[in-house]
Amino acid sequence: MKKSTKLILLAFALLAVAAIGIGSNLYNPYTIEEQHALAEGSSYSSNIQLLARCVNGEARGEEYVGQVAVAAVILNRVDHPSFPKTLAGVIYEPGAFTAVSDGQIDVPIDPNSTVYKACEDAMNGWDPTGGAIYYYNPAKTTNQWIYSREVLCRIGNHVFAR
């Protein structure tokens, strides 16, 4: 069995355990060690799949450029010193993304879907936010701290900031 297949199976097994309530961390079912194991040897296609799952949960219903923008924020975090250095590390950071805490991250994304294509565009360097590392929907957020961040732009329902 290929290493990437084993990692995917491990990820699904861990998510299943968390889903039935055995896991103790409600926001992130993975330990730091498990996150590192998932990130090791990650291929381009598995990274895009993971990114697309997160973007689908975070920006489903947004226009295409809005989905690219959310993907770009996630990728910008990988390069920012305040965040983990891997895509999996950023996405599975406790409390960072609703898509992880509510299980939307578990929904596989069709490689022919719009959200997958948006993530490919972001991975290829398109960043319509101008370097944002945060985004929020002002109609939904309850976090007052986010309003202290410098706003870079607004795309669809999201405000992008740093």
Image (cartoon, helix red, strand yellow):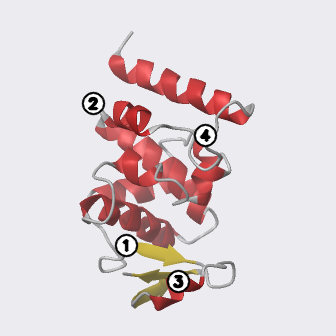
- Identify the element where label 1 is drawn: loop
Real-space CA distance between mark 3 and mark 4, rounded to the nearest whole angstrom: 29 Å
Q: Which residue is mark 1?
A: 133
- State how many labels appear: 4
**Mark 3: amino acid:** Trp
Number of other residues with Cα within 10 Å of mark 2, as a class: few under 14, some 14 to 19, many 20 or more = few
Chain-order first, disc 1 or disc 2: 2
> Could you say which is closer to the camera, residue 22 or residue 85?
22
Which tag, 1 or 3, sits closer to the chain's start?
1
Q: From the viewer's perspective, is the residue at label 2 or at label 3 nearer?
A: 3
- Expressed as whole percent of the image width and height from the top left, the position of residue 113 reads 53, 49
In the image, what residue type sits under mark 4?
Asp
**Mark 1 / mark 4, whichever is N-terminal:** 4
Q: What type is the residue that disc 1 sits on? A: Ile
Q: Visible in this render: residue 81?
A: yes
* Disc nearer the start of the sequence (2/3): 2
Q: Earlier in the sequence, mark 3 or mark 4?
A: 4
How far is the residue under mark 1 from the one under mark 2? 25 Å
Question: What mark, if any, has residue 106 been given in the picture?
Answer: 4
Check disc 3 and report the residue beneath it: 145
What type is the residue that disc 2 sits on?
A: Gly
What is the CA distance from the residue labelled 2 to the residue labelled 3? 36 Å
C-alpha separation, residue under disc 1 versus residue under disc 4:
23 Å
Instruction: Residue 85 in the image: state x and y as whole percent.
Output: 27, 52
Q: Residue 139, relative to residue 51: is it above or below?
A: below
Q: Quick one: quadrant of the C terminus?
A: bottom left
**Considering the numbered disc 3 on the image, is that residue within a helix, a strand or a loop?**
helix
Furthest residue in direction top, as rendered: 1
Asked if marks 1 and 3 touch (Cβ < 8 Å), the reply is no
Horizontal placement of 52 versus 74: left or right?
right
Give residue 41's mark: 2
